[in-house]
Image: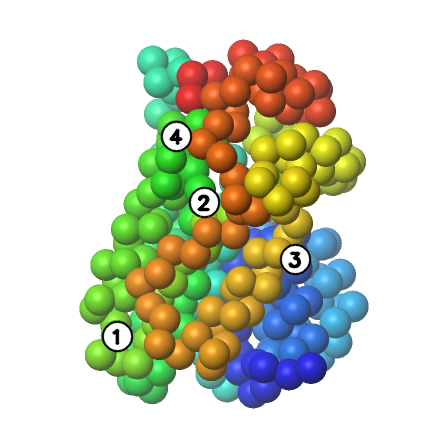
Amino acid sequence: MGGLEGKVAVITGGASGIGAASVRLFAQNGGKVVVADIMEDQGQALANELGTDVVYKKTNVFFEEDIKAVVNEAFARFGKLDIMFNNAGVGGVTGPVDETNMEAFDITVGVLLKGVFMGMKHAALVMKPRRSGCIINTASIAGLQTGFGGHTYSACKAAVIHLTRSVAMELGEFGIRVNCICPGAIATPIFAKTFGAGHEDALKSVDGLKDIFAGVAALGRSGFPEDVAKAAFFLAGDDAQFISGEALKVDGGIGGRFLSDEDTKNKMAAALGIDPEFFGAL
Ligand SMILES: NC(=O)c1ccc[n+]([C@@H]2O[C@H](COP(=O)([O-])OP(=O)(O)OC[C@H]3O[C@@H](n4cnc5c(N)ncnc54)[C@H](O)[C@@H]3O)[C@@H](O)[C@H]2O)c1
């Protein structure tokens, strides 16, 4: 199977979850990929597993110099950058608005919004002269409606959706497409990590989440990282060549209630081993 032959991608947050599934799918379909992530062991292991067309570069999307460096890495290793997938994310600061720690707020915005903005900036810098390229951002259904994440997370994701549309308008004349994906409830370690679990413990929480998420999607099953990776693969490829400024939901037809639903909130808290009050006001 092909589809991305000769294309070079940077995938931030590529060491786990949606990002790792995308790295695999892109590489299995002819793409060359730079895995950009703060998790060195997992990122390097994935690159080792997938062979010479996948490399790992330690990257913290909070820092502009790291984003610049990972774009340079794509050029150094593979000679160009065709696809920038700004996917890295954290659950970020949670809790009631009047108890929000502003340092944690700044870090959350730095990763979820500024990190995506800087990813688009440095992709545009190298894509404009070539008059071609594809930028994909991971937003969330939390950016479309309330009740799917903390206030700061939701606001950042809403901003990513609007930035996607706005930047798409600017870059279209340079042959650069800009889209975002809005995943629904996808079983990954991000939920447990939000409440302090390390990566290995967070991985163990994923099975429990699958059952809960199956109950909130119209399609009756949890979302998986591979579901979102397939959407990114489509948007990255030539079949999507007339699609730009789009926010593509990948949520199995999720309804309007999730963490605002007491029953789901309690089940989630049990699966993550936390007090439901930690979810705060949503
Ligand atoms: N899982 C879901 O239900 C869901 C729903 C909607 C949106 N999303 C979004 O999908 C994206 C991927 O999340 P996931 O669910 O695969 O979670 P995940 O925890 O499995 O993956 C997130 C990855 O981002 C990396 N990361 C975190 N901070 C970083 C930083 N500062 N610099 C570089 N890398 C960093 C992590 O190390 C990890 O590899 C995130 O943007 C998340 O907000 C997830």
Task: First in sequence, mark 2 or 1: give its number.
Answer: 2
The CA span between labels 2 and 3 is: 16 Å
Name which residue type carries label 4. Answer: Thr
Task: First in sequence, mark 2 or 4: give its number.
Answer: 2
Relative vertical location of residue 91 with respect to residue 133 in this rendering, above or below: above
Picture coordinates of residue 34 (x, y %)? 58, 70
Instruction: Single out the mark in the foreground, 4 or 1.
Output: 4
For numbered disc 1, what is the local secondary structure? helix
The residue wearing badge 4 is 146
The disc label shown at residue 172, or none: 1
Quarter of the figure with the N terminus = bottom right
Along the line of sight, the residue nearer the viewer: 142 or 190: 142
Picture coordinates of residue 207 (x, y %)? 77, 37
For numbered disc 4, what is the local secondary structure? loop
The disc label shown at residue 140, or none: 2
The residue wearing badge 3 is 226
Task: First in sequence, mark 4 or 1: give its number.
Answer: 4
Name which residue type carries label 1. Answer: Gly
Q: How many C-alpha atoms fall within 10 Å of the one at disc 4: few (<14), some, or many (≥20)?
A: some
Task: First in sequence, mark 4 or 3: give its number.
Answer: 4
Name which residue type carries label 2. Answer: Ser
Relative vertical location of residue 123 with respect to residue 155 in this rendering, above or below: below
The CA span between labels 3 and 1 is: 28 Å
Beta carbon at label 2 within 8 Å of ligand 1: yes
**Residue 19 appears in view:** no
Beta carbon at label 3 within 8 Å of ligand 1: no
The CA span between labels 4 and 1 is: 31 Å
